[in-house]
Image: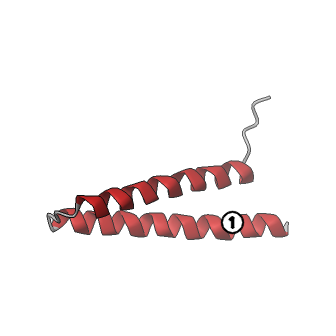
Amino acid sequence: MDDINKLIEILKNFEQEHRDLDEILIRLQEKNTVDFLQIQRLKKRKLILKDKILEIQNKLEPDSIA
């Protein structure tokens, strides 16, 4: 049960960071920032987080396809 609670806490942190990155990207794009490298890095980090979120969700709720 303790492992599940740790996974849930990690999941919450990843989801929050994902939302934060989304807000940052929106602000940067609204400012018409020319730093495309920074935007690209943030988008890459966001995709990595999305994969980690899905991985943890699958551990918490495995598919019942057998």
Say which quarter of the image contains residue 25: bottom left
The residue labelled by disc 1 is: 8
Which amino acid, by three-letter code, is at mark 1?
Ile
Residue drawn at point x = 37 percent, y = 62 percent: 42
Mark 1 residue crowding within 10 angstroms, few (<14) / some (14–19) / many (20+) = some
> Is residue 61 depicted above or below 25 in this figure?
above
Residue 19: % across, % down:
43, 65
Judge left or right: residue 65 versus residue 48: right
Residue furthest right as drawn: 1
Residue 41: % across, % down:
37, 60
Q: Dot 1 lies on which element?
A: helix
Judge left or right: residue 41 versus residue 3: left
Residue 3: % across, % down:
81, 65
Quadrant occupied by the N terminus = bottom right
Residue drawn at point x = 67 percent, y = 71 percent: 9
Residue drawn at point x = 24 percent, y = 69 percent: 27
Quadrant occupied by the C terminus = top right
How many numbered marks have been drawn onto this rendered protein structure? 1
Residue nearest the viewer, comparing 63 with 27: 27
